[in-house]
Amino acid sequence: MMLSQIHYLARISVARACGFAFIGMGMIVAGLSSRLEIAFAVGGCICLIACLILALKAMDAHHRPYNRTEVWLMLDPADRPGPEYAQRVISMARRDAFLNFAHYAAWLGAGQLTASIALQAFLLR
């Protein structure tokens, strides 16, 4: 039960951060909406940069002390595991969440770049 709760809280933590980042990205894309092909190209590139950042954070997840993570703070003090177990489990949960959201960002970026290419092909006719 505790393991699934830690994974759930890690997803909530990463989702919140990604949500704020994607609001900013959406504002950039909305600002370029007068030229949709450029807006989608920029949005796709930004999403791929976000994917890279999330992948790098996943690689570095095991270096962050468990008690300095948002997941640890969100856990009820009564539900917190021991230090040896907590470092391993929280690191793996954060790594999985980062990689999961990196996957989403990669697909979103690929979709936007595909839309940009399709729009450019359509506009060149």
Image: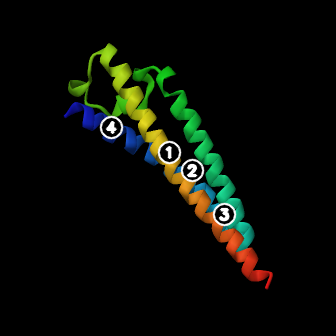
Q: Residue visible at 37% across and 21% down?
A: 88
Residue annotated with mark 2: 21
Lateral position of residue 4 relative to residue 38, left or right: left
Q: Secondary structure at mark 1?
A: helix
Q: Residue visible at 61% across and 55% down?
A: 24
- Residue depth check, mark 3 versus mark 2: number of the one nearer the observer: 3
Q: Secondary structure at mark 4?
A: helix
Task: Give neighbour class at mark 1: few <14, some 14-19, many 20+ (Cα, 10 Å).
Answer: few
- Of the residues under marks 4 and 2, which one precedes in the sequence? 4
Residue annotated with mark 3: 113
- Of the residues under marks 3 and 2, which one precedes in the sequence? 2
Residue annotated with mark 4: 7
The amino acid type, in three-letter code, at marker 1 is Ala
- Alpha-carbon span between mark 4 and mark 3: 31 Å
- Residue depth check, mark 4 versus mark 1: number of the one nearer the observer: 4
Name the image quarter holding residue 31.
Answer: bottom right
Lateral position of residue 27 relative to residue 61, left or right: right
Q: Residue visible at 26% across and 37% down?
A: 5
The amino acid type, in three-letter code, at marker 2 is Ala
Label pair 2/1, CB-CB below 8 angstroms: yes
- Residue 82 horizontal/vertical position (percent): 27, 16
- Alpha-carbon span between mark 3 and mark 2: 19 Å
- Alpha-carbon span between mark 4 and mark 2: 21 Å
